[in-house]
Amino acid sequence: MSLREFRLEAREWLEENCPASIRSQMPEEEIVSGGSKQRSSNPDSYVWLERMASRGWTVPHWPEEYGGADLTTEEYVVLLEEMSAINARIPLTGMGVSMIGPTLLEYGTPEQKAEHLPKIASGEIRWCQGYSEPGAGSDLASLQTRAVEDGDQFIINGQKIWTTLAQHADWIFCLVRTNPEAPKHEGISFMLVDMDQPGVTVRPIKLISGASQFCETFLEDAVAEKKNLVHQLNRGWTVGKRLLQHERSGIQALAQAASGRDARATTGMPITEAAKEYIGTDAAGRIDDPSLRAEITALMMNTRALALTQSRSVEESEGGTPGFTTSVFKLRGADFRKEQLELQLRARGTQALGWQGETFTDEERDVTRNWLGSKAGSIAGGSNEVQLNIISKRVLGLPDA
């Protein structure tokens, strides 16, 4: 099938199958990330999920045997473009489709792929990430959570922190120390752990934005079956680093960026619309503030340039996810999101500083919370300082100081 034929087929199917309520900007309470512990408030979200999963379009680039459609990157971009044309929402998000799924495709055993990937693709299960620990954040390899072999399983004890949305997850992928005598990067293993067991306790952390998406996770004699050790014992650091590259700029994110459909985009009305509504327009219909107009234009140009760079990088990479250059995307993406929200505040003035009360709209309160939440973007998923170190050493080849 030619790309044009695929486009026409996708366009017809989407028009026929996408519910009317799904053709709109997605409120946070309607996001679907898998599992049953946190449900969308819109029943059509699951109609859409089921229909897209039946086509393999929740994970379009995955092999068909694991719930995907085996689309090329070009076909994936076309699909997202056609979804954008009718304002259709992404049917499934989360760490299953963007992080652990692609990692298992690379490092998982056939049995691990068969057990976990179809459940991710269908939205049956939800995943969270067990990396950071108190005292082991930026220096992640200093982690101390221990896993000890015991017959056909490992017994795990330790604490993870900033485990995003762990309270809603069914499984957690963890970095754990399995050889305390080895150099710190060489004694770590990558394991898959069932969250629904007595040895796992989750405590949400209240953030400045009012949300509680980050959690403390305590593992007390928690059990991981040996079949859920990914790759090799004491060789988990390699897997863990690759997963972060998928997180920072995997093929899903790159395809969305190339099509203009970035699922991580800030909620609220577009900055240009907000500026015109709150500030007004000049005789030419432009934002009536030359300085703000210039800054918005620069941000839009830089964001588009980043998307084009991401698209080029994925075309040049093997397996759909670039290597260390993903740190460039993570660094600039976090900065651009913060810049966009700062401009949202400038456009709205004091109306972007509301927490509650009838003088602020729901959209204005959301912008305030998103602005506060965006501050974590330069830390979460690897701090900007860590990304700069990776870029200097692994991309530019600069010597250690």
Image: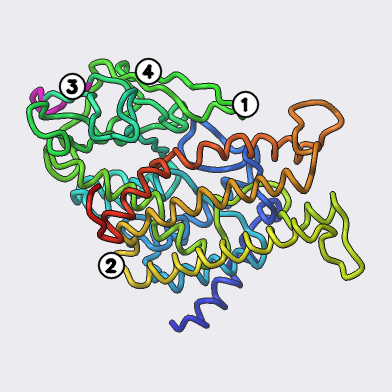
- Image coords of residue 174 (percent x, y): 28, 34
Q: Residue at x 80, y 36 (%)?
A: 350
Amino acid type, mark 1: Gly
Q: Tell me if residue 332 comes above or below residue 361 in the rendering.
A: below
Q: List the residue tagged with mark 3.
A: 155
Amino acid type, mark 3: Ile
Of helix, strand and loop, which one carries label 2?
A: loop
> Answer yes or no: do the residues labelled 1 and 4 have beta carbons within 8 Å?
no
Q: Tell me if residue 55 comes above or below residue 341 in the rendering.
A: below
> Answer yes or no: do the residues labelled 2 and 3 have beta carbons within 8 Å?
no
Amino acid type, mark 2: Glu
Q: Residue at x 46, y 72 (%)?
A: 75
The mark nearer the N terminus, 1 or 4, is: 4
Alpha carbon separation for disc pair 4 and 2: 39 Å
Q: List the residue tagged with mark 4.
A: 201
Q: Residue 219: name its quadrant.
A: top left
Q: Along the line of sight, which residue is nearer the eye, 143 or 94?
A: 143
Which secondary structure class fits the magenta region best? strand
Q: List the residue tagged with mark 2.
A: 318
Image quarter of the N terminus: bottom left
Find the magenta span and give its range. Answer: 149-156
- Image coords of residue 134 (percent x, y): 34, 23
